[in-house]
Image: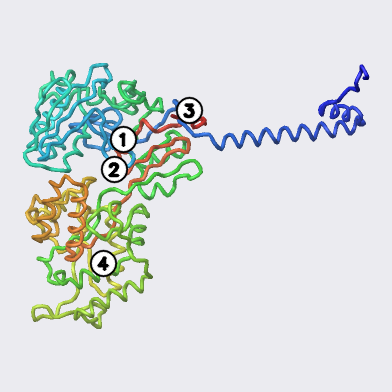
Amino acid sequence: MNPHPPKRFGTFDRLFGYIDSLKASDRAVFFSLLALFLVSLSLFIYSWGRSFLVEVPVEGGTLTEGVVGSPRFINPVLAITRADHDLVALTYSGLMKLTPAGDLENDLAESLTISDDGRVYNIILRQDARFHDGISVTADDVAFTIGLIQNPELKSPLRGNWSGVTVEVIGPYELNLVLENPYTPFKDNLTVGILPRHIWSSLTEEELPFSQHNIEPVGSGPYYIKAVKRNEAGLVSEYDLRAADNYGPEPHIDRIIVRFYQNEQAVADALHNDEITATAALSEESLSAVDSDRHYLVSETLPRIFAIFLNQNRNPVLRDLSVRRALSTALDRRTLIEAAVGGYGEPDLSPLPAGLNEEEPEELAPEERLTRAREILETAGWSLGPDGVYKKTIDGQETPLKFTVRSANGSLFEKAAENLTATWRALGADVSFEFYEQSDLVQTIIRPRDYQALLFGMDVGRSLDLYPFWHSSSREDPGLNVSLYANINVDSLVTKMRVATSTDERDRLIDQFVDEVEHDMPAIFLFSPSFSYAVAEEVKTAEFEKIQRPSERWSNIAEWYMYKSGVWPIFTK
């Protein structure tokens, strides 16, 4: 046996031997190709690995918000202006809050239990909730806040929402809210911000509206006020807010600066010049000029309806159902929305806001709409006169299809009127519009119901309490049934809706209500407007659905972020 067996060479030995045998120029080419391969492989592995990463927010950043006007009452009991409501939403928290999907969830409340008869709301508070000064939020604070809202001397805008509600404090962190009658939409009222009793209770009713705490509030919301900047006139020009850690998850965005401007153009200029990163203060005209390369728009349909409300008592023509149907059929609502609100809205064919119903208008050419509308009129006995206006014998007298619409001064109403006038005159209706200052419209036109038709906006609200707008008991002032509509079935349905505790039952009642109103057509429904928020690309907002007012965009501000990182999914659990 050979004591020295032949040496075996491994794969790498042979490879390196082969490389050593190459000429210097060939070795250079080989190593260049090898380096290129290794770099490409590394990039592939890196890209492949990143495809599995999950984006997560990283704390930090400053959001600068532009607002028109200046706040007067950063106080949930007295807030009136949009500036007031914006700051209240950031600095105060309520018993409940909106989720990104527009549902209600507990905030200061740990639990909410409603009695079987729908009258008693038992609330247990979170014991970890603190005001920004470190004092615990208690049941006494909730009772104190509600007491101020109910105080007639303070004239709180929210007073009507809390009429007849009794507060029973059971313990430091437990209370009952007792209603005189069951009212399902009441739950929405629980989003009102809670005031700290230890700060406000020493003030009299006369002193409270003038307190400095209305401008420098202490709440329990996601942000607290770090500093206040004033202009030469002593008015607040800027708030510097910082993320609070008084309870719940701390907001991702560290700092929010709120700047106040005299008018919309100043806000638009500030956004263009990067002085602010976001604003909800721009009209449709200004939104069209926003730089889409640096900003994006977040839009949400509001629970409001613009419609032509018909007072059939003032004009016999409008009592004819065929006329009401023809007028509605002739309209191209998407063109109307483009003309009135720059496209920021959704068509509406029912008494429900567009965002809460699934009915879409049929897509037809303008002439086809007019043809269908004329067929409706002519089938009902209307004939086109030589002057281009339809006529029909009513109560023994030849009557033209003629009526007057009254409305408020303002760009939206005037532009909508131009579109409606052109469409209905092309149909064969002699329609005219009259405009009034808002206060005059309310006092001299709406309150005495002095109109044949009224172009007006109806704020239905997220909770869909339709009783004030459609129950026959609301036909006279101060009721909101401006169509003077009376239908015994609708009266029963809107009453039952208020007390229905089952979602399925409430949905069934709403469907029946919609069928009744659509059949009777006491109004010509036009569209629901959209709220639009212009925001810089680097700011990532949480969704906000079913909001009733612009300030509710802040409901989930703790989930907004400006910085992000990628992590493996295992680290997000």
> Mark 1 or mark 4: which is in front?
1
The kind of secondary structure element at disc 4 is helix
Which quadrant would the C terminus be assigned to in this image? top left
| Helix, strand or loop under label 3 | helix
Q: CA distance from mark 1 to mark 4?
A: 37 Å
In the image, 236 versus 366, the foreground residue is: 366
Labelled disc at residue 555 = 1
* Residue 221 appears anywhere in the view: yes
Q: Position of residue 245 (x, y in %)?
A: 34, 21
Q: Which mark is residue 458?
A: none
Eye-nearest disc, 2 or 3: 3
Could you tell me if residue 240 is visible in this image?
Answer: no
Label 4 environment density (alpha carbons within 10 Å; few <14, some 14–19, many ≥20) = many
Residue occupied by mark 4: 328
**Sequence order check, earlier mark of 4 and 2:** 4
Label 2 packing within 10 angstroms: few (<14), some (14-19), many (20+): many
Instruction: Tell me the residue at 35%/58% (across/down).
Output: 339
User: Is 246 situated left or right of 12 in this image?
Assistant: left
Quadrant in the picture for residue 416: bottom left
Residue 382, above or below 456: below
Q: Amino acid at mark 2?
A: Ile
- Mark 4 to mark 3 CA distance (whole Å): 56 Å
Residue drawn at x 20%, y 54% is 508
CA distance for labels 4 and 2: 28 Å
Comes first in the chain, label 1 or label 4: 4
Earlier sequence position, callout 3 versus callout 1: 1
In the picture, the disc for residue 547 is 2
What residue did someone put label 3 on? 571
Q: Residue at x 8, y 81 (%)?
A: 396
When asked about the image quadrant of residue 524, the answer is bottom left
Image location of residue 436, percent across then percent down: 19, 55
Residue contact between numbered discs 4 and 2, judged by CB atoms under 8 Å: no
